[in-house]
Every structure is written in C-alpha cells, then in structure tokens.
Amino acid sequence: MGQGHDHGTESMNDGRLAAAVAVNVLLTLAQIIGGVVSGSLSLVADALHNLNDAASLGLALFARKIGRRPADKLMTFGYGRAEIVAALINLTTLVIVGLYLIYEAVNRFLDPQPIDGWIVIWVAGIALAIDVVTAVLVYAQSKTSLNIKAAFLHNVSDAMASVGVIVAGLLIIFYDLYVADLIITLVISAYVLWQGFSLLPRTIRLLMGATPDDLEFDRIVAAVQAVPGVRDLHHVHVWSLDEHNRSLEAHIVPEAASLNAFEQVKAAVRAVLKTEFSIAHATLEPCLNTYLGSDPGGIKAHAGKGDGRHHHHGHDHGQGRGHSHG
C-alpha cells in the first residue's frame, strides 16, 4: 500500500530479526541439553518457549517480506495482513505450549525427579544473557509491529523466567526445595498464556475487519455529518487494511445535487477522516433523490427497491468494496 518505508532501514531491521532468530535457536539447543542432563523441567519449559520465540521471529521475518509486496490483481489491497496472519499462528502456538507446560508440571509434581541445581543455574544464566541481547535487537521494531511486539514481550518474560530458574536452582542447592522447579514451571506457563490471550483478541479483530480499537464508530459518523454540505450518510464501514492502514466506505447524502458540489464535499470529508482518525483510504459514494428536475450536473440515485428513500445498510454488500474511488 505504499507506506514509504526506507529500504535501508528495513534491511537493517531484517538483519536484526535474523540475528535474533539465530541466538534463540542456539539458546533453545543449550537449554534442552541442560534440561535433559540436569533433569530440570523448568529449563525444558523455557527452551520450548524460546523455540517458540525463534519460530515467531522467523515467521515474522518471512511475513514482513511478503507484506512488502505491492497490490496486484489477486490481492487488490496488498499483502499487509501477512504479518497479522503470522501473529495469529504464533499466538495460537504460544497458548498451546503454555497449556502443555502446565500438563507437564502436574505430571512432574506427581512423579518428582532429581535435579542438578548448578547446571540449572549456569544454563539459565546463559539464557538470561541471550534473552537480553534478543530483546535489545527487536525493541525498536516492537513499537510498530504486532508480531515483533509479541516476540519482544516473549523475550522479556523469558528473561524474567530465567531469573526465576536461577532462584529455583539456588533453592534446590541450599535448601533441597525441588518443588521450586515446579513452581517456576507454572510461572513460565502463566507468562506464556497471559501473553497469548492478551494479544489474540486484537489479532482476531484485525483479521475479522473490525473497527480499529482506537476509533469510535459513532464519533466518525458524527464528524462526517458535521462536515458542511453533508445532509446524512449510511452504509458506513470502517476496518483495518493491515496493522497500520485503515479504510472507510460510506454512502453520503449531500445537500447539493451536483457532481461538482459532491466533489467538494468528498474532499472535505476525506480531510476530516485523515486528520482526525488517520483514515487515508476512503471510498465515498453519493446517494441522492431520484427526482432531480432538469439539473444537467445532477447525480442519479441508486437503482434499488422501494421509493428511493435511503435505508441504513440497505444496499447489496456484495458491491461494497468494489466502488470507484473517484
């Protein structure tokens, strides 16, 4: 959709993402080996979370590249929602992992196993360092991308979980509190589930074409109705094209029944939508009375049922997004 990103910056950001994927894969391998050798379920749990982080970052990187493709005849709105689809996959997987970790924690509680506390501490310390490095790599991009924000939050929680694992290891060494490992596992699971369930609703709303979270439908309608030259409007739809671009379509009933007058009204409406609601993509269609006399600049009303009166959402929605953007 022509978002005007700097390609040099995009390449640098992609490089940071690739580096973050690499360090997380290495961290996952180290934690799995350490968890198996030490018998620590919390290390294996944190390894699964980091593996999800690596997959999430890799998928986000892949989706970013797809999302930059221009609109074509197949995807007329462009490929910007690729990252939203990737986010849905990542978050769904995250929730499944969180539920699985709870299941494993309960099983371990019923059948406890010996744990080597020093291995737990050393591996968790390495994990903490890599989590911090990863968070630094993706922090800047997390401000503008839902996918990368999710990955950043994952790494922050991983760092906190690593601190918890270190504490659990010390408790095992000095006080033989093996139950601490199980408690930390449940805490990690809670982080995973909280992150997944907190971001899933927004992701689903974006894919479902819901009104953007920061916009109020009634305020948009009131603002358009307040534009000079607008008598009424209906058939109003507002949705997100992707994470950063919004779109609106509406049928406007102008006060003056001429093309020139409507063009002026349309320009004023679009200015309001862009400045007040950050809606840059607007499809506005005139809707006038059938009887216009002999006005050569008049606009014919829609061909429809009844007496030509305007009903809210009374038009065929199949034609909705295929209107001319005139």
Image (cartoon, rainbow, N blue to C red):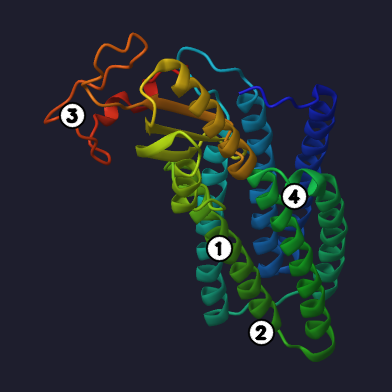
Real-space Cα distance between discs 1 and 4? 19 Å
Q: Exactly how many numbered labels are in the figure?
A: 4
How busy is the neighbourhood of tag 4: few (under 14 within 10 Å), some, or many (20 plus)? some
Q: In the picture, residue 256 is in which quadrant? A: top left
How busy is the neighbourhood of tag 3: few (under 14 within 10 Å), some, or many (20 plus)? some
Q: Nearer the viewer, mark 3 or mark 2?
A: 3
Real-space Cα distance between discs 4 and 3? 69 Å
Residue that lies at the very extreme toward the top in this rendered image: 296
Q: Nearer the viewer, mark 1 or mark 4?
A: 1
How busy is the neighbourhood of tag 1: few (under 14 within 10 Å), some, or many (20 plus)? many
Relative height, residue 58 to residue 113 (above, below): above
- Residue 104: percent from left, percent from top: 54, 69
Real-space Cα distance between discs 2 and 1? 19 Å
Say whether residue 192 is left or right of residue 216: right
Q: Earlier in the sequence, mark 4 or mark 3?
A: 4
The residue lying toward the viewer, choosing from 148 and 249, is 249
Real-space Cα distance between discs 3 and 1? 56 Å
Relative height, residue 215 to residue 299 (above, below): below
Q: Earlier in the sequence, mark 1 or mark 4?
A: 4
Residue 81 visible, this angle: no
Q: Which residue is mark 1?
A: 98
Q: Earlier in the sequence, mark 2 or mark 1?
A: 1
Say whether residue 312 is left or right of residue 269: left
Q: Name the amino acid type tagged 3.
A: Gly
Say whether residue 246 is left or right of residue 167: left
Q: Which residue is mark 2?
A: 179
Real-space Cα distance between discs 3 and 2? 74 Å
Residue that lies at the very extreme toward the front in this rendered image: 294
The residue lying toward the viewer, choosing from 296 and 123, is 296
